[in-house]
Image (cartoon, rainbow, N blue to C red):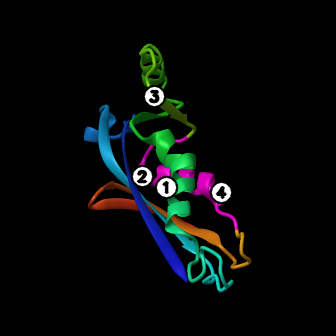
Amino acid sequence: MLITRRLEFDAGHRIPNHASQCRHLHGHRYAIEITLSGQVIAAEGVSEQGMVMDFSEVKAIAMTKVVSQWDHAFLVYRGDQMVVDFLAQIAGHKTVVLDVVPTAENLASEAFKLLDVAYRDTYGNALQLERVRIYETPNNWADAARE
C-alpha cells in the first residue's frame, strides 16, 4: 500500500550558472509530497489500525526534518560564495547552505536523504519512504525515488 502526504512551504533560491531567469535571486511556493509504502496495520485497538501510518505523524516528521528548516529560508549553494557572503551580512536571516545547487532535482534528493532515516517501521508493517516529490511550481516537479 502507498500513502502520500503533501505539504507546502515558501523559500528563495538561485541557480548561479543558469543561462536564463533562474540565475537571479527569487522565490517559490514549493510543495513537497512524501510517499511511504507499507502494509496496513492490522493490530487490534491501536490508534493506527487500518493505516500504513497516521498522516499527522507523516506530517510531523516532514515538518521537523525538512519543511520547518526550509520554510521562509533562502536555499543557497555553498559554492555560490558571493550570495553566501551577502546573506551572512543580514542579521537573523534564515539561510540554508547546501552542498548542491538548489534545483528541484537536488532539493528532492536532499529531502529524500533527510527523510529516509526518519520514517521507521514501528508496527512490523515494512514501512519505508518510497518517493519525495518537490514541486517548484504547479507545473514543474522532480522526484527522488527509492531504487
- In primary-sequence order, the first of circles 4 and 2 is 2
C-alpha separation, residue under disc 2 versus residue under disc 3: 19 Å
- For label 2, the residue is 104
Q: Position of residue 88 (x, y in %)?
A: 48, 18
Q: Residue at 54% of width from left, 52% of height from top?
A: 111
Neighbour tally class for label 1: few under 14, some 14-19, many 20 plus, Cα within 10 Å: many
Q: Secondary structure at mark 2?
A: helix
Mark 2 residue type? Ala
Q: Nearer the viewer, residue 147 or 1?
A: 1
Q: In the drawing, what numbered circle is on residue 94?
A: 3
- For label 4, the residue is 118
- In primary-sequence order, the first of circles 2 and 3 is 3
Q: Would you say the residues marked 1 and 4 are in contact, meaning their CB atoms lie under 8 Å apart?
A: no
> From the image, which quarter does the C terminus lie in?
bottom right
Q: Position of residue 102 (x, y in %)?
A: 45, 43
C-alpha separation, residue under disc 3 versus residue under disc 4: 23 Å
Q: Is residue 13 magenta?
A: no
Q: Main secondary structure of the magenta part?
A: helix
Relative side of 45 to 31, left or right: right
C-alpha separation, residue under disc 1 versus residue under disc 4: 15 Å
User: Is residue 78 depicted above or below 29 in this figure?
Assistant: above
